Image (tube, rainbow, N blue to C red):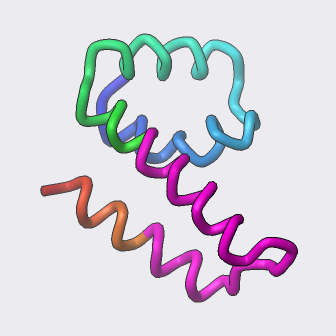
Amino acid sequence: MDCKEIVKLISDYIDREIEEAKREMLEEHIKICKKCESFLNTTVKTIIFSRKIYKNKKIPKKVEKTLYYHIRIRYKK
């Protein structure tokens, strides 16, 4: 599994909506790839931070899409 595949699966991984085999491969990759580990940690922290800000409010889809876009752009650098 390469870094591009990891980025595509992170959301499903966090939401626990990923097949066991893919989850295991993702976790093995993250153990050896600091860039993907950082991406995962940043994404999780962003979700936690967003939940605190919005509490019981739903994040607007436009904000969510913009956030993911910027994370992906940042990751590619």
46 falls in the magenta region? yes
Please name whichever residue, 4 or 41, is drawn nearer the observer in this view of the structure: 41
Which residue is at 58% across, 62% downward?
A: 49
Q: Quadrant of the C terminus?
A: bottom left
> Quadrant of the image for the N terminus?
top left
Q: Is residue 12 above or below residue 2?
A: below
Residue at the outermost front position: 52
Q: Residue at x 36, y 14 (%)?
A: 31
- Examine the rendered structure and indicate whether residue 9 appears above or below residue 2: below
User: What percent of the width, then of the height, locates residue 23?
Assistant: 60, 21
Left or right: 37, with 48 as reference point = left
* Most foreground residue, 69 or 59: 59
Q: Which residue is situated farthest in the right direction here?
A: 56
Q: Is residue 57 magenta?
A: yes
Give how far across and how far down residue 13 sits, in percent.
62, 35
Q: Quadrant of residue 15?
A: top right
Per the picture, the main secondary structure of the magenta-coloured stretch is helix
Residue stretch rendered in magenta on the structure: 41-68
Decide: is 7 above or below 76.
Answer: above
Q: Is residue 66 above or below residue 6?
A: below
Left or right of 17: which side holds 12?
left
Q: Tell me what residue is drawn at x 36 percent, y 44 percent.
A: 39
On the image, the x and y values in percent for residue 32 come to: 28, 14
Residue 33 shown left or right of residue 58 in the figure: left
Q: Position of residue 74 (x, y in %)?
A: 24, 62
